[in-house]
Image (cartoon, rainbow, N blue to C red):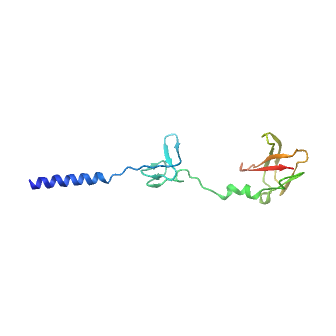
Amino acid sequence: MKKTMYIVLLTVFTVGFSYAQSLSQTVIGSSGATITGASNSLGFTAGEAAVGDLTNGVNLGQGFWLGATAELVLNTEDFLLEIQTSVFPNPVTDYLNLSFNEMVGEDFEIMLYDINGRMIFQKKLLSASENETLSFTSYSSGMYVLNIVQSATNKSKTVKIIKD
C-alpha cells in the first residue's frame, strides 16, 4: 500500500512540475507588419523575439529577427548625390548655380517644377561640367522645386528653391 501511494505521489508531482514550466509567449507591440510572399507569410512586431525556425534559403532560429529578413544594408553610396551636389544661392534673384564637385563628367537630368507641380524647365546635362547656371530671370517670385537625377544610378536630389 505504501509502495502504491509513493508511486502515485511521484507520478502526480512529475506530471505537475512538467506542466508548471510550460509558458506561452505573448507580445504587446506598438507597431508591426505582415510580409507575404509567394509561399510564405511572416507576421511580426517591432523588436519581437523569434521563437521557432524560419527557413527560406537562410535558417533563422531563436533570437531577434529585426533586420535579418530584409537584407537591407545602408551604404554611403546612397548619399553621394546629396553630398556632392550643391545649389546656390537660395533664395535666388536672377541665376541659380549648380555645383557637381567630384561628379564632373557624369550625365544628369535637371527638372524644375512650379508650386502647382507643373514641369516648367527640363535639361539633360551630358558630361556635366563642375558648375552649371540656370536663369531665373523669366520666372515670377515664388517657390519652385528643382529635381536633379543622376542618369547612371537614377538617384536624385530634390531642392526647394525660392525666387525673390
Residue in the picture at 84% in, 46% down: 142
Residue in the picture at 68% in, 55% down: 78
Q: Position of residue 59 (x, y in %)?
A: 46, 52
Quarter-wise, where is residue 2 in the image?
Answer: bottom left
Q: Residue 135 or 149: which is nearer the viewer?
A: 135
Residue in the picture at 71% in, 57% down: 80
Residue in the picture at 45% in, 52% down: 50
Answer with left or right where residue 98 lies relative to residue 25. right
Q: Position of residue 4 (x, y in %)?
A: 12, 52
Q: Residue 96 or 92: which is nearer the viewer?
A: 92
Answer with left or right where residue 61 lies relative to residue 18. right
**Above or below, comparing residue 67 to residue 114 in the picture:** below
Answer with left or right where residue 100 lies relative to residue 8. right
Q: Position of residue 40 (x, y in %)?
A: 49, 42
Q: Residue 90 or 124: which is nearer the viewer?
A: 90
Q: Position of residue 112 (x, y in %)?
A: 81, 45
**How many callouts does the rendering have?**
0
Quarter-wise, where is residue 140 in the image?
Answer: top right
Task: Return the residue found at the far bottom.
Answer: 102
